[in-house]
Amino acid sequence: MRTTGRLGLAALTATTLLLTACSSDDGSDEGPPSDPESGSSSAAPDAPALEPLPAEIPADLRPYYDQRLSWEPCGAADFECADLTVPLDYENVDPAEDIRLTVTRSAATEPDERIGALLMNPGGPGASAVDFAQSAASFLYPSEVRARYDMVGFDARGTGQSEPVECLTGDEMDDYTLTDRTPDSDAEVDELLAAFDTFAQGCQERSGELLGHISTIESARDMDVLRAALGDEKLHYVGFSYGTKLGAVYAGLFPERTGRLVLDAAMDPRLSTLDTDREQAGGFETAFRSFAEDCASRDDCPLGTGGPDAASQALLDFFSTVDAEPLPSGDGERPLTESLAQTGVAYALYAEDLWPMLRDALASAIDDGDGSGLLALADAYNERGADGTYGTTMFAFPAISCLDSPSGNQDADAVRDALASYEEASPTFGRDFAWATLLCAAWPVEPSGGPVSIPATGATDILVIGTLRDPATPYAWAEGLAEQLDTGILLTYDGDGHGAYGGASECVDSAVNAYLLENVSPEEGTTC
């Protein structure tokens, strides 16, 4: 599953639920209360440190840093857009191969009190920060923050409006999403591998040379060019989910130009792909168990009232039933298959706001044989529009992920050997996560990155936020990122869902806003 951030949940985030209380310890270093389902930081993985780039800007990059943006009104009210020019390949700069990135901003409402531009990234990787900024900035950030910062989003290379990666047509994507991701026979394994090959080759044929130049490091370098083009000495930034990796990499490359960074729903860049996949599967299991406990307290729970273990078995039984005979969904060409059902359930675990919709969708599917509700949830995750077209995230996500790090499993035998460890991490979702790793094994471009540790020595305080029962980015990852950053400050949210800022916690919001406006970090060990 993607570590997608706030984009798909923007409308839900606007309707805040009950506000939770915030508590800070009395100065000790004990951290949050023990929670057996939240995970805990393991021993630091052995990963090389990300070295900063030279502070002096190379001569061949100076024209990019000296550019000034030409703004025109666009999109939402008070927003304007511009194109930022960056080199395709920072190691072999050729102006003939330059690419253009779309940037949007809403100017600070009190320019005399302006701190700078506040870049934001909703995650993915691959979600559109332009769309996110225009749709979410007005409610995600209070008026005090919008008064003193320009709200800025830019679509990273290969995403959104910035020369996006392209892979398959809408009809081809429909076929791809119907493919069984938990094969039960050699024939189904062959079908899945063929689907991965078709997807990967489609990306290569439609995206060409761009496919090898959309890494997180290159996007972080683009952010530094954008910082200069916006006229700021320091980069201020709020990143969710994958956006935390992008922000941390920026801090590692440019610590002396790092300003106020908020990294919410954090990733740990030290982890191998295999560990990341397994631990993320465990995160979804934790989130599902939280949902199951809530569901079991209701008389109409479609998974029964026996608790999380019984609910997990009931869901697995339902998946098996749908695997044998897909359910009608209202779309004659796209019945609800096991894979689409798994996607729909997983999507609804990203936010507690979606739990009622998930209960209704499961009840319709299990009790009435109607798969339309789960298909709608799957379509939301897959960014499938009513016209049958798909958003760019479905293409950019694997393209960036596979370039950033080698595949965790290289072939079907490796997956079979690893299945037990995945199912131990997540009885409900482990098999799906295990087989999904083979998409990167089919990728036509060699990975250019791998696990790294990011000390970002010399940066100012960096605020890292972790949610105890986050499905997509387990809490232990936030602990790990804050630990490796020399100036990392961990803020813990004792709650559910993917990402905390702008959600249900007034405590989290107050801490982040104080950091952004006053450059005051919360006390180490603060739990909301």
Image: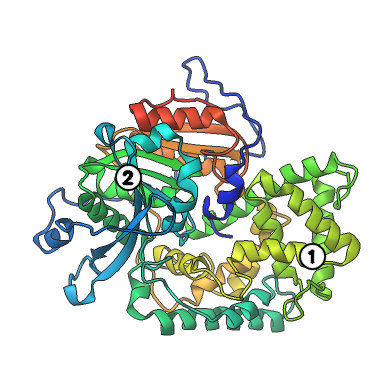
Which quarter shows the C terminus? top right
Judged from the image, the secondary structure of the residue bearing numbered disc 2 is loop
Q: Residue furthest top?
A: 26
Which one is earlier in the sequence, the residue at label 1 or at label 2? 2
x, y percent for residue 362:
81, 57
Label total for image: 2
Cβ–Cβ under 8 Å for marks 1 and 2: no
x, y percent for residue 505:
58, 32
Q: How is the image coloured?
A: rainbow
Badge 2: few (under 14), some or many (20 or more) residues near its Cα, within 10 Å? many
Residue 475: image quadrant is top right
Q: Amino acid at mark 2?
A: Ala
Which quarter shows the N terminus? bottom right
Q: Nearer the viewer, mark 1 or mark 2?
A: 2
Label 2, on which residue? 107
Residue 433 appears in view: no
Q: Residue at x 39, y 35 (%)?
A: 145
Residue 241 numbered tag: none
Residue 373: image quadrant is bottom right
Q: Residue at x 23, y 58 (%)?
A: 69
Above or below: residue 281 compared with residue 197: above
User: 523 and 106: which one is in front?
Assistant: 106
Residue 370: image quadrant is bottom right
Badge 1: few (under 14), some or many (20 or more) residues near its Cα, within 10 Å? many
From the viewer's perspective, tell me whether residue 422 is left or right of residue 294.
Answer: left
Label 1, on which residue? 319
Q: CA distance from mark 1 to mark 2?
A: 49 Å
Q: Amino acid at mark 1?
A: Phe
x, y percent for residue 306:
88, 44
User: 100 and 165: which one is in front?
Assistant: 100
Q: Residue furthest left?
A: 59
User: 310 and 56: which one is in front?
Assistant: 56
